[in-house]
Amino acid sequence: MTELLSYLLPAVLLGLLLWLLYRFVQERRLRRRPYVAPSARHWTTLSPPAEVPLHRICLLGDLGAVATDGRDPVLNLLRRWLEETGSHGTVAMLGDNVYPVGIPPLGHPLRAAAEARMDAQLNLLREFPAQAIFLGGNHDWNKGRPDGYAYLQAQEAYVRHHLPAALFLPENGCPGPVALPLAEGLVLLVLNTQWWVQRGPRPLGRAHGCSATDAKQPFEQLQTLLEQYRGQQIVVVGHHPLYSRAMHGGKFTVKQHVFPLTAAHKRAYVPLPLVGSLFPAYRRVLGAAEDMAHPRYRRMRRRLLQVLRQFPGAVYAAGHDHNLQYFLRRGVHYIVSGAGSKTAFVQPGGKATFTHEHKGFFSLDYYADGQLWLSAWEPADAQGTPAPPAFRWPLVPVAATRPAAPAPAGSGR
C-alpha cells in the first residue's frame, strides 16, 4: 500500500501541475482577446441605421483610478464620444468613481488624490452639453465599511458643488429607483444597488427624502415603473451586475489559485498551491460583500431578476467587474461596463454573448424608429483614438421596432 501511494502521489501532483500549466497557457492565449458567442459572430455584417441617433447613452463604470495628467485613454476616448454626440447624449457613471475609498473627509491623507481624480472627470464633462449622471459604487461608500454613508454624501456634495448640472442619483444615497425620460420612447431607471449590500447606516424613509420605507419596496416601485413605461425602450442602471464571468461572478485565473496573495498586492508572488484555491472557492461559494455569492448580494440579485424577467427587451447595465461583458438571458439584456480605469480577467464562453478584458465602455445608440444598438468603445492609445470596434449588436430586432417618429428640431450633429 505504501509503495502504491509513493507512485500515486507524484502522479497526482504531476497531473495537477500539467493541468495548471495547460490552464495557464490557455488563459494567456485568450486573455485580452474579445470573445463573441457563435450565435453572434456575424455581427460584422450588421450595421445600424445611417441617420444620427435620437439619443446616445455612454455606460462608463469604475473610472476611479483615472489618470490626472491628461493622458488617460478612457477619458480621452470619452472626450471623442462627447464631441461626436453633442447635446443628445447621456453619460451614466456607473459607480466606483473614485478609488480606493471615494471622497474621504477633509484632512484625510487620501483627500487630495480623490479630489484630483474627481476633478478630471468633472472638468471634462463641464465642456460638453451631454447630461451627466453619477451613481455610487462600493468604493464610493468607503468600500462598504460602516461609515460609508458619510463618504457617499461627501462625494454627492462635491459633484453638486463643482458640476451643478450633473445629477447624482438616487439622491442622498436612497435605494431608488429614479425614472429619467431621455427621449421620446426612451427612459432611464436608476438604482442604488450598493444600498442593499452596504454595512452600517443607510438612508430610508421620508426623513431622508427616500420614497421607500423598507428594503422590499424599491423592487415593487421598479416593477411599477417598468409597467408604466412598457412599450418603450427601458434602460436600468446600477453598480452591481446580475450576470458576470469575472471575479465578482466567481471566476478566477490559475494565477489566483497558485498565487492568491496577488489579489491583495499584484507583486505578492508567494506560491500557495492547493491552499491558495481555498480563496477562490470561498469567493465563489460564500463570497465577500461585493460578490454575487454573498447572501445580501444574492438576495438583491434574485429579486431584481424576478422583476426584470417580466419585461423582455429591457436593458440592465452595471459596472463593478473591470471588463466589458454582454448577456442576453430570457429576453433581457445584461451589460457589464466596468473597465473605465482598470482591467481584470473575464472568462470567455458560458452564457455570455460578448466579453473582453480591455479598457473602455459601452454605448447605447437609440434611433427614432425604436432601434437600440450596443457598441463597445475601446481606446487604441493614450490619446483616446478609438480602436476598431470589438463588438456591435442590435438589442432590438429591426422587425420589432416601431414606425419612425419625426426627429425633434435641431437633432442633427
Image (cartoon, rainbow, N blue to C red):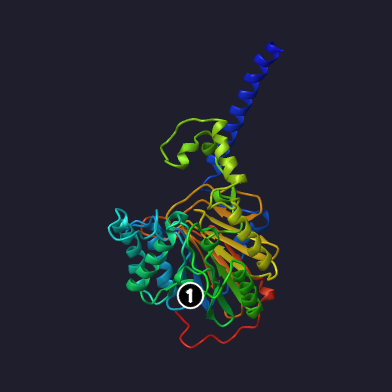
Residue found at x 40% / y 66%: 153
Q: Nearer the viewer, residue 31 or 92?
A: 92
The answer to whether residue 330 is above or below residue 22 is below
**Left or right position of 27 against 60:** right
Res 69 visible: no
Which percent across, then down, holds residue 387? 46, 58
The answer to whether residue 304 is above or below residue 21 is below
Query: The residue tagged with tag 1: helix, strand or loop?
Result: helix
Badge 1 amino acid: Ala
The answer to whether residue 216 is above or below residue 401 is above
Res 290 visible: yes
Residue found at x 54% / y 62%: 318
The answer to whether residue 32 is above or below residue 149 is above
Which percent across, then down, holds residue 401? 66, 77
Q: Nearer the viewer, residue 213 or 43?
A: 213
Q: Nearer the viewer, residue 83 or 326?
A: 326
Residue found at x 68% / y 65%: 306
How many labels were placed on the picture?
1
Which residue sits furthest top? Answer: 3
Q: Nearer the viewer, residue 185 or 44?
A: 185
The quarter of the picture where residue 76 lies is: bottom left
The quadrant of the image that shows the N terminus is top right
The quadrant of the image that shows the C terminus is bottom left
Q: Which residue is mark 1?
A: 207
**Left or right position of 227 against 191:** right
Which residue sits furthest front? Answer: 207
Which percent across, then down, holds residue 336? 55, 59
Label 1 crowd (10 A; few <14 / some 14-19 / many >=20): few
Which percent across, then down, holds residue 32? 51, 48
